[in-house]
Amino acid sequence: MNEHNKIIAIQPLYEAHEGECGGITRALLSEIAEAVSLYIHDHLPKIIDIKAIGLSAPERGVFDKAMGSGEISAEIVTAGRSRIEETRFPGVWWVRHYGVNGELQAEWIEVTEVPEIMKADRADMVVGLKNLRDNGSKGG
């Protein structure tokens, strides 16, 4: 073998463990990390549509495990139900919307301080303020 035909051992950048998919999860985690960086530096929130990606069941398990659970969760019940959970990464929220039949309708990762759905509507606040003042003037 001459000098130009040497065999070079190539080491993978990532070594998957048995039963692990990981490729899509690594790409998603990289995109989420970039979104967190943009939010920290430029205050730009980002939504990543997880349902549209169509993760396979094994990849979904890997992604769920990678995201983990944080300290905060909330549920909103209206026409259907919405579940908002902080992941183990601060500022990275998992938002799921279910229809009245309980079927998952929408699911995304939202990178922000507080998910948009959790913010009070200004018109609702005006009504709430009126009710507070009315109750206060009636003594309870």
Image: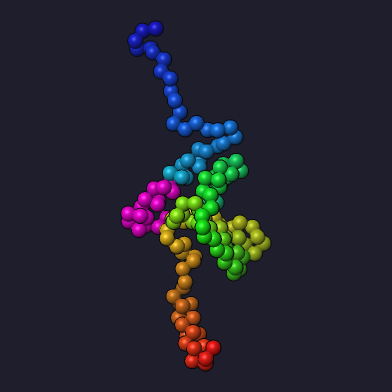
Residue range in magenta is 31-47
The percent coordinates of residue 80 (x first, y second) are 61, 65
Question: Which residue ends up furthest to the left in the rendered image?
Answer: 41
The rendered magenta stretch, by its main secondary structure, is classed as helix
* Quarter placement of the C terminus: bottom right
Question: Which residue ends up furthest to the right in the rendered image?
Answer: 101
Quadrant of the rendered image containing residue 113: bottom left
Examine the rendered structure and indicate whether residue 38 appears above or below residue 132.
Answer: above
Q: Residue at x 56, y 58 (%)?
A: 96
Relative placement, left or right, of 4 versus 61 is left
Q: Residue at x 45, y 62 (%)?
A: 114
Task: Look at the image and tell me whether residue 47 can be seen.
Answer: no
Q: Residue at x 57, y 36 (%)?
A: 20
Task: Look at the image and tell me whether residue 22 can be seen.
Answer: yes
Q: Residue at x 45, y 55 (%)?
A: 90
The percent coordinates of residue 40 (x first, y second) are 35, 55
**Was residue 36 drawn as part of the magenta stretch in this picture?**
yes
The percent coordinates of residue 137 (x first, y second) are 49, 92
